[in-house]
Image: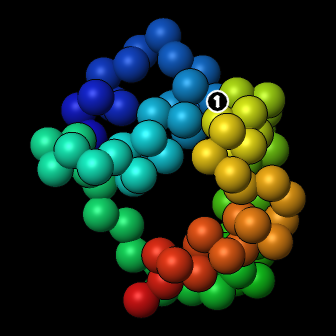
């Protein structure tokens, strides 16, 4: 978590990419375990889509490189994190 919080010069896109990189990391020292307890509709209502939008092209490009193209792919990925 320090790796994300210590990036004082980062914009929201940089922070979003860093957060997602920690979620998918295979290195246990860097991995962040995330469990989602809400469905996609609740998350959308609570603003996660707005956060992705504000992350701009940096987050979208990172997701595309990871194979997450479009809302359906993002919803599937979120479903894998759901408890």
80 lies left or right of 76: left
Residue displayed at 47% across by 75% down? 81
Q: Residue furthest right?
A: 70
Measured as percent of width and height from the top left, residue 41 is found at 76, 83
Colour scheme: rainbow
Q: Residue furthest top?
A: 9
Count of marks, rendered view: 1
Q: Residues within 10 Å of mark 1 (few under 14, many from 20)?
A: many
Of the pair 83 and 46, the residue shown nearer to us: 83
For the N terminus, which image quadrant? Answer: top left
Of the pair 74 and 39, the residue shown nearer to us: 74
Residue displayed at 52% across by 78% down? 80
Residue displayed at 59% across by 72% down? 78
Of the pair 32 and 26, the residue shown nearer to us: 26
Measured as percent of width and height from the top left, residue 65 is found at 67, 39
Residue 60 versus residue 38 in the image, above or below: above
Residue holding disc 1? 13
Secondary structure at numbered mark 1: helix
Residue 44 versus residue 66 in the image, above or below: below
Measured as percent of width and height from the top left, residue 27 is found at 21, 44
Quadrant assignment, res 61 = top right
1 lies left or right of 11: left
Measured as percent of width and height from the top left, residue 76 is found at 67, 76
Residue displayed at 49% across by 46% down? 20
Q: Visible in this render: residue 55? A: no
Q: Visible in this render: residue 11? A: yes
For the C terminus, which image quadrant? Answer: bottom left
Residue 29 versus residue 67 in the image, above or below: above
């Amino acid at each position: 978590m320090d790796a994300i919080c210590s990036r004082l010069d980062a914009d929201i896109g940089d922070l979003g990419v860093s957060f997602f990189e920690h979620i998918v990391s295979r290195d246990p020292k860097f991995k962040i375990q995330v469990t989602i307890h809400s469905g996609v509709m609740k998350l959308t209502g609570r603003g996660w889509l707005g956060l992705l939008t504000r992350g701009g092209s940096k987050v979208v490009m990172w997701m595309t490189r990871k194979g997450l193209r479009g809302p359906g792919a993002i919803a599937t990925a979120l479903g894998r994190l759901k408890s």
